[in-house]
Amino acid sequence: MPQFAQYVACAVRKRSNVFLLVCLVLVIYGSWNYISRLRVDGKSVSDQPIIDYLAKYLKVTVTAGDTFPTARSVLITLTNVGYSHISYGQWRIYFYSLAPQRTNETAGFQVRWVNGGLNYLSPIKGKFKGLAPTESVELFFREWKCSSKTDQFPNWYVASTVYGLSSPRIMESTRGESLSFVNQFTNAFQWKRNEFDAYHPYTPTERYNTNNATYGTSTSTSEDLIQVIPKPFSVKPKSDKNVVFDKTWVVVKQSSADTDHVTPSELLALKFGLKTVTQRTSSKYVEFKTSGNFSDEQYEIQVNSDTESIDIITKNGAGAFYGVQTLISMLESSFVIPEVVIKDHPRFKYRGYMIDVSRNFHNKTTIMKLIDTMSMYKLNKLHMHLTDDDGWRIEIPSLPELTMYGSRRCNYFDEELCLSPNLGSGPYPDSSGSGYYTVQDFREILTYAKERYVQVIPEIDVPGHAFAAIKATELRDKNSHLFKNSGNGPSYLLSDDVSGIKSVQGWVGDSLNPCMNSTYRFFETVLTDLKDIYKGVQTLDVVHVGGDEVPKGIWEHSRTCKSMFHGSSLVHNTIKKMFLLTIADIAHKHGMKISVWEDGIYSSKEGPYGAKEFKQSEVYVNTWNNIWEQGTGGRAIEFADQGHKVILSMATHLYFDHPYEPDPEERGLYWATRYTDTYKVFGFIPMNIFANAEFDLSGKRIDLNELCKGPCPHTKAPENYAGMEACIWSETVRNESQLYDMTFPRLLAFAERAWHMAKWEEIVSVPEREKSKKEDFQRFVKVVGKKELPRLEEAGITYRITPPGVIFSEKDRIAKVNTFYQGHKVMVALGNNSRWKYSQNEFKVPVGVSDIYARAISPVLKRGSRTVYLQINSGAQSISCSIHVYITFVLIIVQIIVN
């Protein structure tokens, strides 16, 4: 019971005037004391009631600017929806923005940037007038473009400015993944990037027409006898006979000393519940054979009707594994398979997927499920972005502070207990912002991947994107008694930056210093421990060293660099190149090649660093920054011609952190391209880079002659295109569902291009190439919708469901619906009727209904897509008019009869 309630009871019990007077005074004092704790005046012994009240009752609403030039703005409305007055106090509201805010004042609040994208609002004494119940205040932010709902981040929180006075609390209106505090985007000014932006959200009618065109009428060929993704190189029928596969078949065990991988024979037997035997029977068997003439990963499948047998011919285990994946895919379509010969091999040796686990952590189970699915579609490289400004995600036993500190995000970053809570992770260290792989976790991931012929490539991102490492090693130095032997251990300090220069993501102090010996000691220690983690499981022969997005001028004020270069002029690229060559030497000493993002090995004046400057025979380069109108689209060609091994990772086509559609309701960033749908990924042409330059950022069609100033170049060394890599950066991807939604089904289109070279890729005529590509895509979509999407859901992969199309005819009040993928169904709700019902392809819309809501439903898990909405004519006015005409006509007839 509150204290003042006890005083009231006291006054009732005592009868004398003196006692009544004393008790009355105590009641007034107790009431004032209790209420004052809720008035947010900053004078309470504990701020917890204040913090709790603000978190529960201060409602946040975010609205994107809706006119130019204020479209580059955001309006934040704070509303007191509780019962008490909110006054000035020692509290702050923390929020994350991809556009770091400038320090300024607005509506009685001070706006401060912390680091990265973390900012806070705090009331200004004497200027913040307070908020009475139901009262609101509007805060206007310029230069904060919000063209998508996911530009805003969840889990804003309120905290006291005095450490230990209270615990922070997430503001309830912003909690979770719904982002319901972001108002709807109601006009084009809000969702357009600028006034020249030609993109718009698809209408239900546009979707309907696109879906119809996607179904198409593509003609079947012999290669369409089987439905497998990725498409095999060659499928030739031997006859018009079939083979019926059932559980009476047996699998002949492979005689192999390879115990490091899942034996393909065991994989096939386990999948269909078959027996394994040591010798083949007279019929109904699957047998593995070897051929020294085959290349690695190549396989051949021969289906024989006369002996009722299937032979899988390969050179090694990888080829057998991929042959079995093809056979499993065939049998999951039908147990009746044609008598064919399938010859297949990959176009690229490197078929990779990069996942960022630093910005938001994804646990071991999620990664293993991803590996399983990658292997189904013959992808063989998992590039794990393990470190960045926002978190260090792998245990390094020699440097425990990297995960003790660098893997945790929470509110108490000022007290050096954790990193700052960026990317909407909230104030607590149990969110997607925290976590790491122990040595045991990572070895399990390595083992699981190796069994499925997937190589795991670790990325330690240096010298930029290193805030987590820099702060962790600073903490180590301050607490030397915890981490060093009696204070005599070596230093691992990584920076003496005093420049104040921000990175692209708004971080200050996030770059290692190449002029400090401790930087290289740190890097070698990390490599040594990584090598031990890999030992006995996978061979660590490639390490990705990042190298990207280092802010220019970051080292020019370094005392250490000035000392090293004896006061001579410091050139950014000279220092960066020195760093890269040095860590490449360290990697070479440990028997490793390096991979690097393109800008880490590129000079704007000189071009790519020379391949011969490295001790490694091969240096792998991820070419990614191909925004066409910025003149960087030809970087892949430059690197290949210089002798580097190029991994095509084009941001305009292969960055899966970008949205599927140009719609503000879609998740993702849009700095490289407004959207990347499955068709765009499917249509990527690796060997003709500039053929992919179709539209610029604003949706304007690109003139290749103008872009290239003549004929567009091609590489002179196509053999240096090592492969392709799709990438997912996780700024807006906070959980497993979002990860799979952004990855699939785009990853299937990527696997198709990385494994199989389509015939249309070599057609010179653009119209003919587009026609052939669309026909091939119709085949792909049919297979994906009919077979692959159900397979994904059965494996627990919650892929993105494309919303349905809807059209309406006012003449007969008939609505028609369709889906992008065959096998999906449509549910509709009419008008204000909240009851959703499965729909036929077309249906009658009752008079009076003015709204149609529709969503596509998946075939296995019955999940729903995003809802689409079509406003139609209710028909009520025309009916009313018809009745009025009818009545008038009757009255005229009656009048005639009477007269």
Image (cartoon, grey):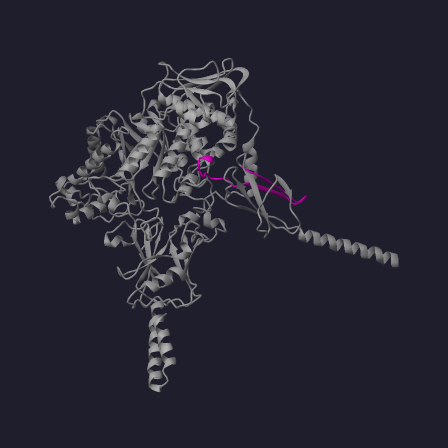
Name the residue nearer the viewer: 778 or 742.
742
In the picture, residue 43 is in which quadrant?
bottom left
Counting from the top left corner in percent of width and height, residue 189 is at 47, 50
User: Magenta residues?
Assistant: 794-819
Q: From this viewpoint, is residue 493 visible?
A: yes
User: Which x, y percent locates residue 167?
Assistant: 31, 58
Q: Is residue 173 above or below residue 302?
A: below
Q: Quadrant of the N terminus?
A: bottom left
Task: Residue 796: say if magenta.
Answer: yes
| Residue 827 occupies quadrant | top right
Asked if residue 636 lies left or right of residue 844, the reply is left
Q: Residue at x 34, y 80 (%)?
A: 23
Q: Nearer the viewer, residue 730 or 250?
A: 250
Frontmost residue, 25 versus 680: 25
Q: Is residue 413 above or below residue 802?
A: below
The picture places residue 7, in percent across and down from the top left corner, at: 35, 76
Q: Is residue 656 above or below residue 882?
A: above
